[in-house]
Amino acid sequence: MDALRDALPRTRGWFTAIGVLIAVFLLAPLIAVLPLAFTSSKYLVFPAVGFSWQWFDTVLTDPAWQGSIMNSARVAVTAAVIAMVTGTSAALAVRRISGGRRIVRTVLLAPMVMPQLVLALGLYLTYKNLVGGTSLTVLTLGQATLAMPLVFVTVSAGLAAVDPNLSRAAQSLGYRWPSVVWRIELPLVGRSVISGAILAFAVCFDEAVLAFFLVPPSQQTLPVKIWTSASENASPAIAAASALVICLAVTLLAVVALVGSRPNKQEAS
């Protein structure tokens, strides 16, 4: 990296300027939405008028908003647990595959590149024909499918830093593979598993495409509630709900960074 900087002294300023412009472009929607969450106006008007906490109070006390937040939380937690178990298991299994590892890895990563609209339509048509409709359970399975590759990639990266000779040494001492996984590998990649689960929860909590197709009208999640509210009355409560989602996402990313920066007990010892 230092050699690249020395080789391009004249273009360094241009790269910096382009990076700043990209950051401004990405952050501009947040800069526009967050002030509207504190407006005293009854409508979404930019720039914000006055200052008030009333829209946060509306989101946190209104039964419709409360129900959507609880639905999103339940679906995200369940989907994150499923993604954590399946993604971690897949990473451990791929580590032991000697042939065809690239093919298996490509198949496991396919949900990351698959258009969410295609997955949503497939799940909707499948479960509509099988059980006559959709439910939060169908949404949970769909979101777990989307989140599993994140856990798989995160845990695989953690396993790549683990010396395989540790597992071989444990096996030479008489440990079978379940004990090797439970006592050797999982403790060494525990931070990666936790980080992957947190990322999976963050993705599932504010996922909108699958939720729009698979959520019953009486069980809306928070993204669907924001969308329907925006199309009906454009209340500043939408901005308040969006601000809460942004705060949650930033908090989760900070937790992931904190977990990743802490020294492992096995490494410290």
Image (cartoon, rainbow, N blue to C red):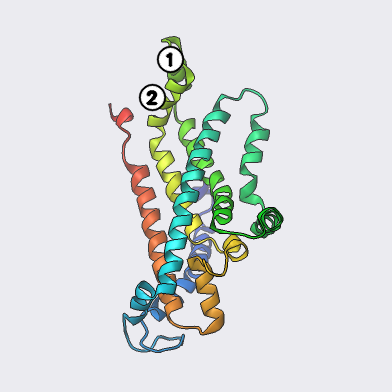
User: Residue 92 has which mark?
Assistant: none
- Earlier residue among tags 2 and 1: 1
Q: Position of residue 38 (x, y in %)?
A: 35, 80
- Find the distance from the CA under tag 2 to the CA under tag 1: 10 Å
Q: Secondary structure at mark 2?
A: helix
Q: Residue at x 46, y 83 (%)?
A: 235
x, y percentage for residue 58? 37, 78
Q: Can residue 202 be seen in this snapshot?
A: no
Describe residue 67's horizontal placement relative to residue 111 as left or right: left
Q: Amino acid at mark 1?
A: Tyr
Among all residues in the image, which is located at the extreme left? 269
Mark 1 surroundings: few (<14), some (14-19) or many (≥20) residues within 10 A: some
Q: Is residue 106 above or below residue 113?
A: above
Image point (51%, 35%), residue name: 156
Name the spot of residue 79 as percent of width and height, x first.
Answer: 50, 50
Q: Which mark is residue 175?
A: 1
User: Residue at (40%, 69%) from the top-left corner?
Assistant: 66
Helix, strand or loop at label 1? It is loop
Do tag 2 and tag 1 residues touch (Cβ < 8 Å)?
Answer: yes
| Camera-nearest residue between 163 and 182 | 182
